Image (cartoon, helix red, strand yellow):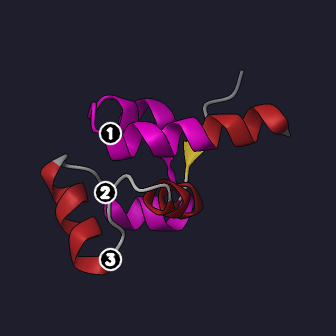
Amino acid sequence: MAEVLVTLKHARAASLSGVGVLCAPSIRTWFARYGLDLQTFLREGLPATTLEATGDAFALRAVAIARAEQEAA
């Protein structure tokens, strides 16, 4: 099975579900906290496994949304 990519669309959906924040300063801070590349995420997304490794509730919710979308396709 192909690696699931989590994109901004999934992050927005996770934020709308009440987990996380998605304003520009907050997302920059969040990515910096975990040492993740925000620009790559914005351009092409990041592998679900990369975000899962953070253990962060927001990341885990975004991953779950991305995986559910892939399974439904």
Q: What is the x, y in percent for residue 41?
A: 44, 59
- Earlier sequence position, callout 3 versus callout 1: 3
Q: What stretch is highlighted in magenta?
A: 38-65
For label 3, the SS is: loop
Q: 23 above or below 4?
A: below
Image spot of residue 54 (x, y percent): 26, 34
Mark 2, residue position:
37
What separation in Å lies between label 3 and label 1 (alpha carbons)?
17 Å
40 within the magenta span: yes
Type of amino acid under label 3:
Cys
Q: Residue 57 carries which label?
A: 1
Q: Are marks 3 and 1 in contact (CB under 8 Å)?
A: no
Q: Where is residue 9 in the image (x, y as percent from the top left)?
A: 58, 62
Q: How far apart are marks 3 and 2 (CA)?
A: 17 Å
Q: Is residue 48 magenta?
A: yes
Q: Which mark is residue 23?
A: 3
- What is the crowding at mark 3: few (fewer than 14 residues within 10 Å), some, or many (at least 20)? few
